[in-house]
Amino acid sequence: MQKCPQCGGEDCTHIVINLKEEDTVQFYACRRCEAKWWEHEGDTIALDEVLNLAAQSEVR
Ligand SMILES: [Zn+2]
């Protein structure tokens, strides 16, 4: 289970978003402090980067 980087809480909403076949972005939202963050390939990324990845996945 993912821990919140802000408050250390373990009660987080976790959503997996598929960008393309095996490329996913994980979205987490803490229920205690309402922190939100994204992860891609194990790294925390900014929303801007999520949008970049999403845009790339639509271009073929
Ligand atoms: Zn938190």
Image (cartoon, grey):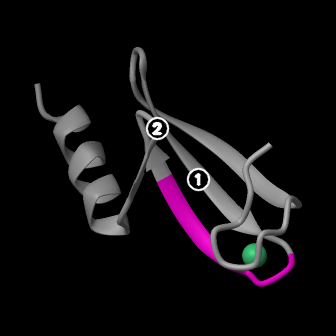
Q: Quadrant of the C terminus?
A: top left
Residue bearing mark 1: 27
Compared with 28, 4 (above or below) is: below
Q: Secondary structure at mark 2?
A: loop
Q: Is residue 43 magenta?
A: no
Residue at image x 35%, y 65%? Answer: 46
Residue at image x 60%, y 71%? Answer: 36
Compared with 14, 33 (above or below) is: below
Q: Quadrant of residue 54?
A: top left
Between residues 46 and 43, which one lies in front from this camera angle? 43
Image side of residue 32 versus residue 40, left or right: right
Between residues 43 and 23, which one lies in front from this camera angle? 43
Mark on residue 42?
2
Magenta-tinted stretch: 32-38
Image spot of residue 31 (x, y percent): 84, 73
Q: Quadrant of ligand 1?
A: bottom right
